[in-house]
Image (cartoon, rainbow, N blue to C red):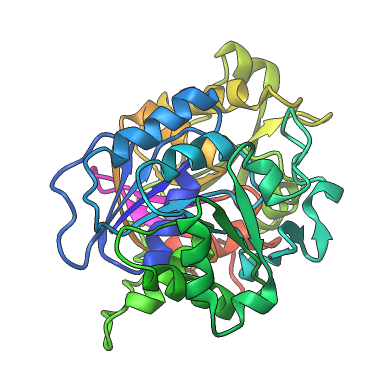
Amino acid sequence: MLAIADDLSGAGEVAVALGLPGRIVLGPAPGGPPPGPGEAVVHDLDTRRLPGAAAADAVRAVLKDTGPDALVFKKVDSQLRGNFAAEAAAFAEGAPGPVVATALPPLGRTVRGGVVHLDGVPLHETDGWRAERADPPRSVAEALGDLPTRVVPLDAVRGPGLAALLAELTDGGAVPLCDAETAADLDAVAAAACACGPGMRLLGTAGLGAAVCRMLAPPNPAPVPAVCPAPGGRPLLMVVGTAEPAAGAQIAALAALGARHVALSADALASGTALVPALAPGGITVLSIDAPAGIVPGAARALVTGLARAVAAVPVPADLVLTGGETARRVLDALGVAELAPHGQIHHGAVHATAPDGRSVVTRPGSYGGPDSLLTIARALRPVPSGEAV
């Protein structure tokens, strides 16, 4: 199975959702041998901030050698951010579909009437795009631009004729946009899409990827590998580059139990002069961006690049926790990491993997996790008796 994502935290999310052994490749170029039976390769194309044409070319580069019967899944952001229209158009070239389902029920992200809802509120009425230059789209169809689309409402998703309807729409040149509110809805979409015949492509969140995996899973699947604590002597460096308001509470919960919090000046990050203090062996340090007025829309990439530069300058190898797909990719690029081996999930979206040099790497979308997210991740990598400091 081949899967592609537009940022690294999303690629990690998909790798775990698929439930198959495999690897995450940082880029469109093949890394190592192709996937064998029962394996998956997930490509992080790192296209979230690219111009639309370049993002579409990256999708085509991955798909150019894909056979006509290959099962291909494209992960998209559940809030429709990034080059949604350009990448979807490239993904649709030369194949039936794609069938689109952008709901992510575990996080309260549902689709009804072709409109994405966050905890019941239409996306365009929330602040989910606070760090973006543009306003959020009012519907999935609007986000897809010029692609011809048709909404598949919930009653059709839950009805007996879904496969026939998807086949009719795709044969007629339309892209089906499937409503969904539950994992069972996504299971129905995945089963119906694959029933349409070989070569059908699917585009959606990791929730749809997990539905595909459930449909194809063997009767007695191998257990998901446990998260293995990293060697105690190695520092644990948590890099928080997200603009999400919840990040402050997550950092505070960890710092209250003994972790060191270092807020790096936005000016120093932008100018490339920020420095990370020496890391204590076995200690936990959290890096964040010191921007009291908030991160100016459009400035995030320069600040995250500064964070990555500062992390790469740390002389002692550290295990890493990277929140936000842009943060994760910039840090790993700066460290020369081109591939990850995913192992499991600490909590939803917090994916534990290892780099070729043996260090642990946890990636997590910036908008995921409750107030104890970072604390939960730290204790998974550095277990301590209940009630003690991290």
Residue 78 to residue 48: above or below: below
Q: Which corner quadrant of the image does residue 356 belong to?
A: top left
Residue at x 45% of width, y 36% of height: 329
Q: Estimate the x, y position of residue 316 in percent, counting from the top left.
A: 36, 34
Q: Quadrant of the C terminus?
A: bottom right
**Does residue 211 appear in this view?**
no
Q: Estimate the x, y position of residue 97 in percent, counting from the top left.
A: 45, 54
**Does residue 197 appear in this view?**
yes
Between 302 and 134, the one lying in front of the other is 134
Q: Quadrant of the N terminus?
A: bottom left
The residue range painted magenta reads 351-364
Which residue ends up furthest to the front in the rendered image? 172
Q: How many tags in the picture?
A: 0
Q: Is residue 54 left or right of residue 132?
A: left
Q: Say if the magenta span includes residue 53.
A: no
Q: Is residue 67 left or right of residue 373?
A: left
Between 13 and 243, the one lying in front of the other is 13
Residue 96 to residue 157: above or below: above
Q: Estimate the x, y position of residue 383 in percent, counting from the top left.
A: 46, 68
Question: What main secondary structure does the magenta stretch of the protein show?
Answer: strand
Residue at x 19% of width, y 55% of height: 35
Which residue ends up furthest to the bottom in the rendered image? 219
Between 130 and 199, the one lying in front of the other is 199
Residue at x 53% of width, y 26% of height: 52
Q: Estimate the x, y position of residue 95 in percent, counting from the top left.
A: 36, 49
Residue 86 to residue 368: above or below: above
Q: In this view, does 156 lie to the left or right of 97?
A: right
